[in-house]
């Protein structure tokens, strides 16, 4: 899933909803990447999940 902000700063609290394929089961890793629009910098976040 990709969310485009068009270079705008997000609100203090941001919620994004997505779906995962229904055939996925067991343990998985979700990687979140936030690219800062006007710099080469990015933030990364990982989540261990079990379906």
Image (spheres, rainbow, N blue to C red):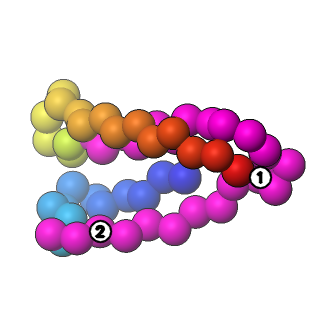
**Boundaries of the magenta span:** 12-35
Magenta highlight: main SS? loop
Q: Secondary structure at mark 2?
A: loop
How dense is the environment of label 2, judged by Cα within 10 Å: few (below 14), some, or many (20 and up)?
A: few
> Relative to 29, is 15 above or below?
below
Instruction: Please state if 31 lies on the left or on the right of 38 as rendered.
Output: right
Residue at position x 66%, y 37% from top? 27
Residue 10: quarter of image: bottom left
Q: CA distance from mark 2 to mark 1?
A: 23 Å
The residue drawn where x is 81% and y is 56% is 22
| Residue 38 placement, left or right of 20 | left
Q: Position of residue 38 (x, y in %)?
A: 14, 41
Q: Residue furthest top?
A: 40
Give the side of residue 1 with respect to residue 39, left or right.
Answer: right
Q: Secondary structure at mark 1?
A: loop
Residue 21's x, y, as percent?
77, 52
**Magenta highlight on residue 43:** no
Corner quadrant of residue 4: bottom left
Q: Is residue 13 in the magenta section?
A: yes
Q: Nearer the viewer, residue 16 or 26?
A: 26
* 29 versus 18 height, above or below: above
Residue 36, picture quadrant: top left
Q: Is residue 3 above or below residue 28?
A: below
Which of pointers 2 and 1 lies earlier in the amino acid sequence?
Answer: 2
Q: Residues within 10 Å of mark 1 (few under 14, many from 20)?
A: few
Residue 40 coordinates in the image, percent (x, y): 18, 28
What's the residue at 23%, 34% (across, down)?
A: 42
Q: Which mark is residue 30?
A: none
Residue that carries the numbered disc 1 in the rendered image:
21
Q: Which residue is mark 2?
A: 14
* Side of 21 where 12 appears, left or right: left
- The front one of 8 and 45 is 45
């Amino acid at each position: 899933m990709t969310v485009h902000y068009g270079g705008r700063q997000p609100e203090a609290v941001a919620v994004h909803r997505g779906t995962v394929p229904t055939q996925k089961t067991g343990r998985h890793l979700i990687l979140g990447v936030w690219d800062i629009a006007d710099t080469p910098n990015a933030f990364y976040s990982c989540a261990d999940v079990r379906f």
